[in-house]
Amino acid sequence: MSISALRDDLSEQMLAFAWDEWAQMGVLADTGRADNWAADPEELLLFTLELGRDDPRLFDESLDWLLLNERLLSTQRLRNVALDAEDRALVDAALAWTAGKRSPATLRRAGSKRARSGQPARALFRTSPAEIASPEESFLQHGLIRAPIAASKKSRAPQLARPINFAFRLRALLGIGARAETIRTLLGTDARALSVQQIARSAAYAKRNVQEAVSALHAAGAIEALSVGNERHYSIDKQRWAQLLALDAAQLPRHREWIALLGALRRIIRWLADPGNEQLSDYMRASRARELVEEIAPSLQAAGVGAGLGALVGDEYWAEFVEIARGAVRVLWMGR
């Protein structure tokens, strides 16, 4: 299978997934889905901004949702889940656009930022030209060229009763910060108890912030603490919290390792979209694919996509990479 064929196959499935998720979160789109897991809003948005480079309509509808619902998100957490400079450019451009829509003076004051940086700009969308007569200034500031955006204003606020919007419901109750993310993780996991480091990985806040959050929640009697070896672990009474939220304990939305899974998929998307990889020999293509998998293996394994990593050698490894990439996309739909 060629890189382009694999990219098209995976992109179709990931785009369908993203549209389904956003339709349940307030973007105007059709879906018959009612997922029983809690979305990670910041990680999903960043994944969508990357994936939307192949679907401008998805990209712009996610921005439309952001313009209406930015107050529900943590901009700090959005930046925390960014993996690299490419992620940060997408995040900062999206936030600059929303800020400019609310206060045009903000955009004008930042207008010379890109010119001072000296970095060459590149096309945002993979199918659009690199030169546009009047590019969107908020994106140009961050080195991304695209046409001006007209918000559709079709998005709605998330319905908090839906399982997928559980993060927003907890933020309404506990505020935006590490406490809400801690409770979301503890309520959704099957583990008896989690360490601060394990919670921090999903909360996407610094370990110090999560430690402060669990200490405060424990002091308030909201969670329990127990010693496991030399380490403190934390658990939660799901039945009590379910009653507080007017749910049955079995209805509590499931936790998924979204940061690990969607982060790994972003790296795969970019690798498959790199035109330089299309020109490689079969051996070099497999070699570069192996290097990518070795880099993202911890994330794949954390997300449950670990079986068989690195079993084949030479150009035969390409077939294994295809199965790993397909396996990561299958995990997206797991439990539906």
Image (tube, rainbow, N blue to C red):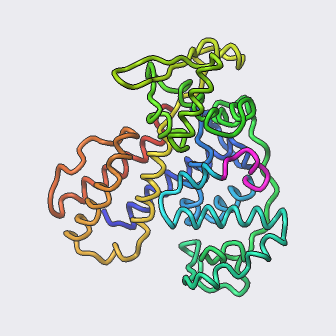
Residue 166 appears in the figure: yes
Q: Which residues are magenta?
A: 66-75
Residue 244: x and y in percent read 71, 16
In the rendered view, would you say 211 is above or below 143? above
Residue 328: x and y in percent read 39, 46
Secondary structure mostly taken by the magenta-highlighted segment of the chain? helix
In the rendered view, would you say 244 is above or below 103? above
Specify the quadrant of the image occupied by residue 60: bottom right
* Residue situated in front as seen by the camera: 98 or 308: 98
* Residue situated in front as seen by the camera: 192 or 307: 192
Instruction: Report how many numbered discs are placed on residues in the image.
Output: 0
* 23 horizontally vs 204: left or right: right
Q: Is residue 67 magenta?
A: yes
* Residue situated in front as seen by the camera: 193 or 297: 193
Residue 250: x and y in percent read 57, 16
* 62 horizontally vs 232: left or right: right
Q: Is residue 170 magenta?
A: no
Identify the residue at horizontal 61%, vertical 61% (top origin). Answer: 91
Residue 36 appears in the figure: no
Identify the residue at horizontal 61%, vertical 37% (top origin). Answer: 178
Specify the quadrant of the image occupied by residue 330: top left
Q: Residue furthest left?
A: 313
In the rendered view, would you say 73 is above or below 85? above
Screen quadrant of the N terminus: bottom left
Residue 159: x and y in percent read 75, 35
Identify the residue at horizontal 45%, vertical 26% (top origin). Answer: 194
* Residue situated in front as seen by the camera: 214 or 145: 214
Specify the quadrant of the image occupied by residue 115: bottom right
